[in-house]
Amino acid sequence: MGILRQVYKNAVLTETEFRIISDKHTLITIPKGQFLLSESQYSKEYYCIETGLLRAYVIDFNGHEITTNFIGEGELAIDVTSLFHRLPAKENVHALTDVKAWKIEFDHFQELYHQIPNFNEWGRAWMAQQLVDLKEKSTAMITRSAKERYLQLLEKSPQIIKHAPLKYIATYLGITDTSLSRIRKEIST
């Protein structure tokens, strides 16, 4: 449950409130290669990742997989649009490694969100941070070179470099496999 404390660390929760929230989570394991969510499915829960690495991706208009996100330890695997607006998912999410995660069902989340005001505040703060992160990523795709984006990923998320195939990292950075190989070679020399 230590990972739940990390995930909900910014919430001003009493010990009782934290226990109520953590009791609504269920520990699950997701084997490498298994899908958490597939395009057109409806999301019914979200996951607090304890160990392992997940990849979210979409299929572009040419039929190519484009990585939209990696989700690792201490992060949430969630399709916000599907979960909260009850729409079919547009992304696929699968395990790149074996994953241990704490699952919370949407109905339990809703109950807690209305029952515990501090949990409600945590949710708003989390969503605001996600918007900031998304804006930073989209701006970086325009203002930073591919090498700078790779170096930032290497610094902030070494587990991605360690566990994700290069082709997934390349699409996440918006570059080709060849460009990524050249950048990695340049950095190592």
Image (cartoon, rainbow, N blue to C red):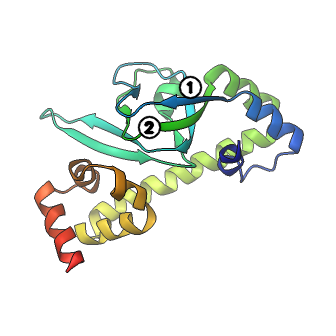
Q: Is residue 69 above or below residue 184?
A: above
Q: Which residue is mark 1?
A: 45
Give the residue type at disc 1. Glu
Give the residue type at disc 2. Asp
Q: Is residue 124 above or below residue 179?
A: above
Label 1: element kind: strand
State which quadrant residue 175 falls in. Answer: bottom left
Q: Decide: marks 1, 2 in contact (CB < 8 A)?
A: no
Q: Which residue is mark 2?
A: 98
State which quadrant residue 22 falls in. Answer: top right
Q: Is residue 188 above or below residue 158?
A: below
Mark earlier in primary sequence (1, 2): 1
The circle drawn on residue 79 is none
Label 2: element kind: loop
Q: Is residue 21 above or below residue 105?
A: below
Residue 112 in the figure: left or right of residue 165: right
* Residue drawn at point x = 17 percent, y = 72 percent: 185
Residue 185 in the figure: left or right of residue 28: left
Please provide percent x and percent y for residue 160.
Answer: 38, 54
